[in-house]
Image (cartoon, rainbow, N blue to C red):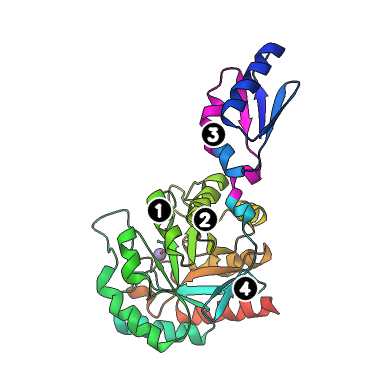
Amino acid sequence: MIIHFQNNLKEKQKKEIKISLAKFLKKAEISIHGSYLIIENENKEELSGFLSRIEAIEGIGLAKLSNEETYPLINKRKISPLKIKNKTIGDKTFRLIAGPCAIEDKNTYLKTIKNLEKAGADILRAPLFKPRMSPHSFQGMEKNGLNIIIEARNKTSLPFITEITDPRQIDWLYERVDIFQIGARNMRNYELLKELGSARKPVMLKRAAGASLKEWLLAAEYILSRGNDKIILCERGDYSPNNSEGGINFNMALRAIDLSGLPMIIDISHSTTAKKFILPMAKASAAIGANGLMVEASLNPQLASVDGKHTIDISRFKKLSAEIKKLRK
Ligand code: PEP
Ligand code: MN
């Protein structure tokens, strides 16, 4: 950690600051170098824990943690691909996560997933909870859709992913799906992050619209802090006033991959909100070294209660999948 002193401090004042710091950073090495001070501490978590106390000391200007101190658990984590049922995420294979925005009825869903599997999907979306802007919009089938997931699991060996919006859903969904998704609206729901950290099931953490890299990675750090290192990041883009220009922040995704080494999925549906941009965005996602993409695809997008506008049908999904296969070679 580097601490810049405020301007024009006397040597005596700098030494007093050093003494104040040493009172609570007992094992740290503290050294003064002219206009700044360096704190070295074996225990990286401790420094971010004390940041507020450090900043409160009079005479301190800017206190800056290194990446290793800001994200100590991400840094300690062994980088290796995640194994989820019969699939891996985080290695060289570009993965396709696909399925409807929401499960709406049994027959459509079962037919959809069979078709998606045949066309090359690796992981299937099984959303029961839809956090919507309006309480009058379709909210998802909620617990009523559980039986559909149970039946779907008997029909395929592919892994399933579902969004969790409340810790109370964890228990009854635990054995039914393989990945829990934290949606953009819940990236800052710290109690949910902690509970999913304790649940020890793979978690896909979306970046909240407008969230900084630091907020996003610290959300992952929350999950790690409860012992769960099975984390996948998902870039889903930012909002814009008419919801069509926000788009994927590839720069943010690249930096997150570089800093964390965590697997990265790009959500090319919610970020583009237009079918015609799905293919170029898929190619761009592969080009930046992401580990796969998430796309909303179903049998009858025109009948969907939610996100039918950008959900692709099976024939478009087949084309997308064929293009991705070419990229894999
Ligand atoms: C979703 O993937 O179903 C979803 C609701 O996305 P987001 O949280 O990114 O809006
Ligand atoms: Mn959707």
Label 2 to label 4, Cα distance in Å?
25 Å
**Location of residue 254 by image quarter:** bottom right
The type of residue carrying mark 2 is Leu
Q: What secondary structure is found at the residue carrying circle 4?
A: loop
Say which residue label 1 marks.
Answer: 186
The number of callouts visible is 4
Say which residue label 3 marks.
Answer: 50
Q: Quadrant of the C terminus?
A: bottom right
Is the C-beta of the residue carrying label 1 under 8 Å from the nearest atom of ligand 1? yes
Q: Is residue 148 magenta-colored?
A: no
The type of residue carrying mark 3 is Phe
Q: Quadrant of the N terminus?
A: top right
Disc marking residue 94: 4
> Quick check: which quadrant has ligand 1?
bottom left
Range shown magenta: 49-72
Mark 2 neighbour class, 10 Å CA radius: few under 14, some 14 to 19, many 20 or more: many
